[in-house]
């Protein structure tokens, strides 16, 4: 057998691919190579070198070219990715592709870690003074007279600058340079003295530097968790090591980046999906080279190389945004733990509302629990009150008591947050005469009315149609908007409080990059205002004048069949409530519900999140649900229901019969139809993760070979977070 390279290619197949080594040059494990694939070419990553081939050499193709002299992915990342692909049953190629910024998955030279700049030479300055150039050349000289500019800045300012740059560079009037690495800011005021609980948390984690130890920092909102992160990152830097800080959303990033930069006085790189591709690749490479020591990022930043790793922090560890819901379905928190173990560094998970998974791990002693129980800066945790909506006259869903409280707060010059986790004007458009309601034909779900757009929109498949003027079923004109979304609440509150600015914050009003920051930036800290928004408002950004939080419409969460709905609801209520009373003014939270006696709400409000979480954990223990049981979900969709049924029944039959596995289904998915596709699923559960993986691993290979698999789209989800 010839010796080959085993290569991961970015395709959704559960295998690696064998190639003969390149004609020239050597390809090391972790390097990228260009290979012939099908009728075209692909960039892959060498996973194993010098291994005997599985097939005869006649069929083997040769690597065309080695793209990296030295491995791009180091031994730790290669090892972690192999574990991750095995754990989440992902296609190995997709796991490796996830780890690389898009630009590094292409057949191109690596970008420089610093974006090159263009600057005037002395000769250029004289030429400008002498007025010797015209047109585009002169414009470029003038632009650079203000100081060096990056390619990105030039692209934005002078779209046709490249030709001029070539002429001017040839004439020696401008030159390319590298920006200086020193950050252009000065460290801010000294940090606050840590209070005793913060200090205890910092020293516990710092004591674990140099070895793997997970910590759960369980601290109420505003208790100073971020200060703990900052103090620990400072200590990491003092040892010459790197720190990775994960946050669930970019919305949280700008304020935190500012805080990090001001405190640490070193460059901080940011990695998230809204970044330009070049910037993303450069930041990734700067961490790889050790040029930067601190990176803040969202989910995929968990793959950042950390050759000098010192510490990994996962903020808001309970957040569902850490789970990737397509392709390679990893969970960034769990992957961070895998990396911490491989790198031998502590991993700090922080939250005011820890996931039940992490609480169970802390209880079992696998995580070291740290608590922050008080708010520093003399702020008080807000008072929470329930408003019983039953038999109340509602105004666009708002009760008199709630409107009254809003009126009082704005009269005092304070700010109010009205929280509703539904965008649009109303979730249903109903005919009052015949009962018809507008439904998406591709999903069989009600369409959401968006009044400003005059559209009905499906929130599941994005289908849009015009709002009918009469009922399509009976011709009546009595079409009524049922229920409330943020758009309707904005309208109702504007009508009620015409003098007060009402600001809506949801996915529609924050479509542009930075829009979230800008909207909140306009908010003066000493004038009254009303914010209406979805869960985007649940976190980030401190609003010192915000004293009242009104939560409307949480009842869906109480009634949902999803076993995680209660946990999510408790987390959301606590997080949203935490926005109130961040400064010295006392905060108040009102929760409007038709179910004031619901046990979960009761426990949550009377005894707090920890008690509610204990109650939910006890339920999960009784029912054998995660974290007391483990799940793998097989999802399947196709245009024909019969194809879905055939595949799922073949898949089910192929499962080994053992008494360690419980199988639920095949059954329709919670949304049996979506975007015109029939959907079904098969849930496999076990109390033993080891047994579950042992059974499912070989089964997943077998699934790809089932003839009925060819007529469907299917995927496996290990530890699914929504069923
Ligand atoms: P969390 O991340 O838990 O929500 P933060 O770290 O943002 O909390 O802290 C909340 C507020 O309290 C911030 O304004 C922060 O500057 C302040 N703070 C935190 N720790 C201290 C401290 N030890 N002394 C004084 N103020 C503090
Ligand atoms: Zn009708
Ligand atoms: Zn739809």
Image: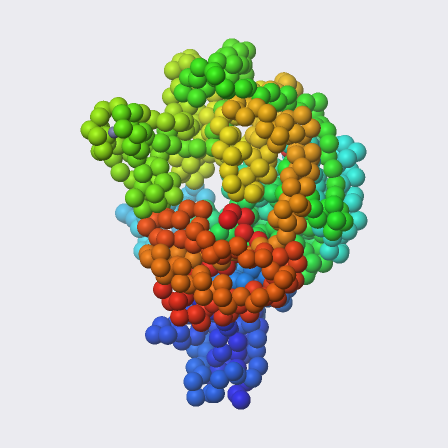
Give left or right: position of 167 versus 91: left
Along the line of sight, which residue is nearer the eye, 716 or 152?
716
In the image, 292 versus 178, the foreground residue is 292
Toward the viewer: 398 or 113? 398
Residue 125 seen in the figure:
no
Image side of residue 485 versus residue 359, left or right: left
Residue 675 placement (x, y as % from top left): 34, 49
Q: Is residue 431 visible?
A: yes
Position of 41 with respect to 404 (left or right) is: left
Seen at 23% across and 33% down, the residue is 473
Counting from the top left corner in percent of width and height, residue 642 is at 35, 59
Residue 195 higher or lower than 458, as above or below:
above
Q: How many numbered badges does the structure rendering display?
A: 0
Residue at horizontal 49 percent and vertical 33 percent from the top: 556
Say which residue appears at 72% left-offset and 29% top-offset: 374
- Specify the farthest residue to the left: 475
Answer with the quarter of the image where residue 308 lies. bottom right
Q: Residue at x 64, y 18 (%)?
A: 586
Q: Percent from the top left, x then y, of residue 53? A: 52, 83
With respect to residue 553, does 707 lie above or below? below
Give percent across and percent down for residue 6. Answer: 53, 76
In the displayed structure, would residue 570 be above or below residue 172?
above
Q: Quadrant of ligand 2?
A: top left
Snapshot colouring: rainbow
Figure check: 336 above or below 79 = above
């Amino acid at each position: 057998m010839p010796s080959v390279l085993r290569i991961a290619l970015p395709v959704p197949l559960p295998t690696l691919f064998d190639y003969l080594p390149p004609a020239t040059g050597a390809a090391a494990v972790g390097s990228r190579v260009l290979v012939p694939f099908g009728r075209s070419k692909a960039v892959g990553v060498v996973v194993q070198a010098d291994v005997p081939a599985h097939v005869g050499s006649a069929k083997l193709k040769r690597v065309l070219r080695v793209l990296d002299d030295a491995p791009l992915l180091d031994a730790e990342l290669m090892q972690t990715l192999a574990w991750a692909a095995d754990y989440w049953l992902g296609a190995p190629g997709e796991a490796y592709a996830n780890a690389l910024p898009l630009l590094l998955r292409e057949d191109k030279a690596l970008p420089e870690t610093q974006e090159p700049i263009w600057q005037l030479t002395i000769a250029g300055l004289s030429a400008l003074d002498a007025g010797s150039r015209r047109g585009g050349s002169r414009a470029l000289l003038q632009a650079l007279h203000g100081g060096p500019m990056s390619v990105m800045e030039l692209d934005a300012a002078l779209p046709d600058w490249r030709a001029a740059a070539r002429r001017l560079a040839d004439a020696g009037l401008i030159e390319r340079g590298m920006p200086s690495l020193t950050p252009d800011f000065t460290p801010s005021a000294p940090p606050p003295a840590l209070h005793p609980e913060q200090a205890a948390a910092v020293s516990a984690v710092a004591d674990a530097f140099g070895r793997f130890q997970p910590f759960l920092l369980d601290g109420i909102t505003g208790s100073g968790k971020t200060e703990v992160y900052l103090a620990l990152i400072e200590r990491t830097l003092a040892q010459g090591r790197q720190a990775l800080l994960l946050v669930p959303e970019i919305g949280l990033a700008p304020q935190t980046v500012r805080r990090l930069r001001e405190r640490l006085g070193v460059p901080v790189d940011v990695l998230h999906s809204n970044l330009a591709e070049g910037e993303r690749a450069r930041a990734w490479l700067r961490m790889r080279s050790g040029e930067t020591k601190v990176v803040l990022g969202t989910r995929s930043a968990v793959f950042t190389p950390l050759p000098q790793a010192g510490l990994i922090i996962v903020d808001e560890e309970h957040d569902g945004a850490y789970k990737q819901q397509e392709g390679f379905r990893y969970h960034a928190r769990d992957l961070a733990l895998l990396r911490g173990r491989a790198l031998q560094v502590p991993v700090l998970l922080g939250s005011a509302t820890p996931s039940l998974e992490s609480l169970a791990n802390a209880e079992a002693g696998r995580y070291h629990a740290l608590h922050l129980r008080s708010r520093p800066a003399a702020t008080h945790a807000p008072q929470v009150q329930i408003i019983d909506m039953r038999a109340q006259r509602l105004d666009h869903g708002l009760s008199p008591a709630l409107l009254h409280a809003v009126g009082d707060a704005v009269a005092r010059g304070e700010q109010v947050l009205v929280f509703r986790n539904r965008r649009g004007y109303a979730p249903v458009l109903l005919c009052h005469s015949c009962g018809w309601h507008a439904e998406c034909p591709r999903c069989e779900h009600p369409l959401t009315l968006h009044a400003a757009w005059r559209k009905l929109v499906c929130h599941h498949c994005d289908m849009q149609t015009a709002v009918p003027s009469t009922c399509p079923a009976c011709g009546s004109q009595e079409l009524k908007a049922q229920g409330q979304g943020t758009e309707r609440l904005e309208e109702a509150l504007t009508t009620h409080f015409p003098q007060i600015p009402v600001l809506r914050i949801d996915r529609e009003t924050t479509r542009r990059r930075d829009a979230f920051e800008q909207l909140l930036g306009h908010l003066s800290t000493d004038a009254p205002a009303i914010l209406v928004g979805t869960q985007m408002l649940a976190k980030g950004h401190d609003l010192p004048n915000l004293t009242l939080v009104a939560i409307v419409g949480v009842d869906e969460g109480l009634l949902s069949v999803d076993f995680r709905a209660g946990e999510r609801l408790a987390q959301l209520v606590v997080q949203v409530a935490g926005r109130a009373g961040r400064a010295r003014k006392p905060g108040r939270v009102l929760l409007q519900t038709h179910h004031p006696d619901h046990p979960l709400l009761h426990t949550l409000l009377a005894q707090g999140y920890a008690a509610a979480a204990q109650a939910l954990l006890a339920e999960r223990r009784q029912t054998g649900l995660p974290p007391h049981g483990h799940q793998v979900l097989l999802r399947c969709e196709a245009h024909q229901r019969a194809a879905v049924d055939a595949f799922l029944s073949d898949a089910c039959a192929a499962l080994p019969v053992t008494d360690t596995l419980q199988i639920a289904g095949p059954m329709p998915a919670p949304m049996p139809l979506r975007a015109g596709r029939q959907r079904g699923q098969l849930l496999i559960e076990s109390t033993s993760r080891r047994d579950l993986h042992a059974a499912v691993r070989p089964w997943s290979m077998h699934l790809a070979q089932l003839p009925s698999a060819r007529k469907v789209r299917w995927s496996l989800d290990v530890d699914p977070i929504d069923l």
